[in-house]
Image (tube, rainbow, N blue to C red):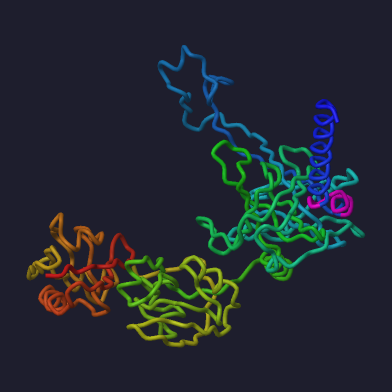
Amino acid sequence: MTRMTRQFSLWMLLTLAVLACQSALARELPDFTGLVKEAAPGVVNISTSRVVERPGSPFGEFGGQDIPEIFRHFFGDRMPVPPGGGGRSEERQSLGSGFIIDADGYIMTNAHVVDAADQILVRLNDRRELEAELVGADEKTDVALLKVDADDLPTLELGDSDRLEVGEWVAAIGSPFGFDHSVTAGIVSAINRTLPRDVYVPFIQTDVAINPGNSGGPLFNLDGEVVGINSQIFTRSGGFMGLSFAIPINVAMDVADQLQADGSVSRGWLGVMIQPVSRELAESFGMDNPRGALIADLDPEGPAAEGGLQAGDIILEVNGQEVERSSTLPRLIGRVAPGDDVELSVLRDGELRTIRLAVGAWPDKPVLAGGNGDNAAPARLGVVVQSLEEGERRKLGLEHGVRVTELAPDGIAASAGIRPGDILVSIGQRTVESPAQLGELVAALPEGSVVPVRLYRDGRSYYVALRLASD
């Protein structure tokens, strides 16, 4: 065999190997064509419009942002608006997506898609445009239910979002930037994500490309079942960056059922102010690992206070479900119908307790309780404290406590995050009644121990972990 023949044979073998790998890879990657053909008729485009009043300007079209340079020297970026002045109406429009869940015309989307809309238009896959009625919307979960006057509409099959697993393939159909029925695909990146200001939704995180206009559209599994509603993206540019979040369909349908039945959503409420359990706080409460939700304060007339919960309790389980972190608690309690009993596993004074109480209904405006005297300077903490007058305690809604007036910059209290003006309410689960008593409590604490301190600051209660140095 000549050298050229050997090189040609080697090249052929490599080519065949590459083709074999490509063929194997193609067999492993999912094919979404069948899913799209089946599901696309049930996905809709949603457009909304609303009329807003725009302030007028004595300079007509030059009012607002588009001001000639000659006027910027005098007025900056905006023209002055005269009293009573010359406003005009302006129509604003927005786009989103949705999907049909009932053949009689019920459609699900995001609450923010239809927020404050004067008119909602739904464009079906067959290009029909129908005006929709807002049945109800729930801002806490960002779910809205619409109704159009139609029947025999194509519906989508709903799946079980609780069975989703990280790494599973998913696909989205929606109208990003107004491009109808665009399809994108990816995998589930994480489940049970908690986002700021969205404590009631255990989001599904994916790397599916989602952009403005996709909001409210369905997220599918490989069986063509809807497992989520695409709701949010994390972005610094305004476009997709690989972090997309969907509302689990199980959560959304629970909300939709309530909206259809009552036009509103009711959810359970305890009446507690909670905070995360840090590693230092966990140690101070005698826990091996940080977990659960620490009760920093209670509504004195709320279900938690009436049911026997106390500030300093750490809720570890709700009806047998673990509270992994503080953000988990509102979600678990929110699922409980107001008036139903709930069983809580609570850590108090180092002991596990089971407390059963009736959950209340979420109020429109939840309320939480939010001088002169002998000075004391517990040198061990590095603080100077002052008694609270009775009138001040009543005003703050506190039964006891002492105010921090001075701090040693390198003291134990300052290192724990205590500030001048804070009110020390308890230390080591013992209430602080006076400066003198605080000194006695601190003196009795073991060397090298870590103890929880409850303090009141800016209308809220907090816990910090105080680590006592060894002498």
Vertical placement of residue 189 versus 164, above or below: above
Residue sitting nearer the eye, 72 or 296: 296
Vertical placement of residue 190 versus 438, above or below: above
- Which of the image's four quarters has the N terminus? top right
Residue sitting nearer the eye, 207 or 408: 207
Q: What predominant SS class does the magenta segment belong to?
A: helix
Which quadrant holds residue 414? Answer: bottom left
Residue 260 is inside the magenta segment:
no
x and y, in percent, of residue 401 in the image: 21, 72
x and y, in percent, of residue 25 in the image: 78, 48
x and y, in percent, of residue 85 in the image: 52, 30
Q: Residue at x 60, y 78 (%)?
A: 337
x and y, in percent, of residue 213 in the image: 70, 43
| Magenta region, residue range | 28-38
Q: Residue at x 33, y 77 (%)?
A: 286
Is residue 396 shown left or right of residue 308? left
Is residue 319 shown left or right of residue 468? right
